[in-house]
Image (tube, grey):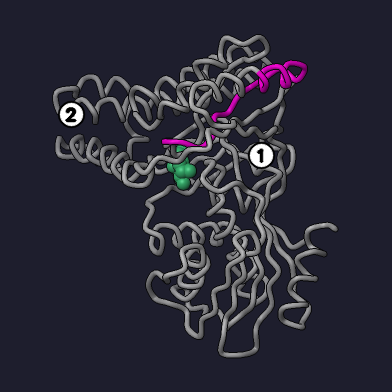
Amino acid sequence: MVINNWLSAFFVKEFQTEPRCFRSPGRINLIGEHTDYNEGFVLPAGIDKFCSIAIAPSGSDFTTLIATDLDEHCITNHFPEEKHSNAWSNYVFGVVAAFKKRGKNIPHFNAVVKSDVPVGAGLSSSAALESVFAYAFNEIFQCGFDRLELTRIAKEAENEFIGLQCGIMDMFASIHAKLDHVIRLDCRSLDFEYVPMKLGGNKIVLFDTCVKHELASSEYNTRRLECISVVDKLNERGENFPSLRNVSMEMLESNRNLFSDNEFKRARYVIQENIRLSNFCDAVEREDWSKAGSLLLEAHNGLQNDYEVSCTELDFLVENVKELNGVWGARMMGGGFGGCTLNLVAEEKVNEVVQTISDAYKNQFGIDLKYYIAGTSDGAAEF
Ligand code: GLA
């Protein structure tokens, strides 16, 4: 049964009314990692894995949320101002709170959630959840926000309710994605361009380490602070920079003595990553896969050694895949400390590469590697 029929049937059985169904995708990011909160550039695309919901006003004083994948219910007669004991429902309540801040009180509702975006794989399952609720509330309760404001709402839910100081990329991608396209987004102006996803005879293959190290959110917030500190130190010297976007390599090097070793490395990575993204787009345009692949490897090297957000499992995958026949390049993707690597692989070699790297990974870590061939999709929509 197609997913919206399944969700509707589930909803009707539970609540005896007809719902409306919405979905929003997870995302990949081709290149441009940890650049979004530094007002740089990113290159994400919506993937063909979605967080889907069936939803309708409850007409009562209660809201019921059902997560079918977890077999969990959350029933409440008020929207909590602070975190609820039920972890996943907070992503929804965070969105309700962000609407309220904008003067839109969301009435009580019932919703059934089903997601095939793998959790903890760096594919932004939480952004997909926040985005689909932001989009659905806006439609059902006719709040009149545009996609950009819905993106801000979803981000605010994550920043203020969940407490992760993430940038705008994940929600932006989930809400604005376009089938067969990547989004080249300027995270300062929020201007963006849909670039056709041209891969020649290649595929984007994701290898999921199936690990997520504890450090992820605390280190994420630390990286943000280190980047801010570099900007603050330059500003104390008389500059007036809002972010690392204003800082060039020459400027960083000529002020080397202002920074700790870590600050210097973090900033160097961010500055170089923005340049790499631009070079990557040019290489793809020319269908120069060898160049595109080497830029992915360079990006991984920066994430591993300068930004220090990789981990043994991710490094192992990149190190071992890069010599295989048919692999142009690879890098860790997303926030880091686990999740997936992104690999650019010649289509006819995909099966062989998957087999070889899965065996090596199992041998090394005793873990069955998961893999996904990333397809693209449209952003948040009713379906
Ligand atoms: C996570 C965050 C994003 C972005 C990436 C790294 O996915 O949610 O905002 O910073 O990490 O590029």
On the image, the x and y values in percent for residue 82 come to 37, 72
Q: Is residue 250 above or below residue 177?
A: above
Report the quarter where the C terminus lies: bottom right
In the image, residue 290 above or below residue 224 = above
Judge left or right: residue 167 versus residue 13. Answer: left
Q: In this figure, which residue is indicated by the disc labeled 1? A: 194
User: Which residue appears at 63% of the width and 48% of the height?
Assistant: 117
In the image, 172 versus 191, the foreground residue is 172
- Say left or right for 100 vs 372: left
How far from the left and from the top, in percent, is residue 375? 72, 37
Check disc 2 and give the amino acid type: Phe
Residue at (74% x, 63% y) in the render: 382
Q: Measuring 61% from the left and 90% from the top, which residue is drawn there?
A: 60
For discs 1 and 2, the disc positioned in front in the rendered view: 2
> At 34% across and 34% down in the image, what residue appears?
246
Give, as a single range, the part of the protein colored magenta.
337-355
Q: Is residue 38 above or below residue 261?
A: below
On screen, residue 308 versus residue 183, left or right, reads left
Residue in the foreground of this view, choosing between 131 and 196: 131
Magenta run includes residue 340: yes
Element assignment for label 1: strand
Which residue bears the numbered disc 2?
A: 259
The local secondary structure at tag 2 comes to: loop
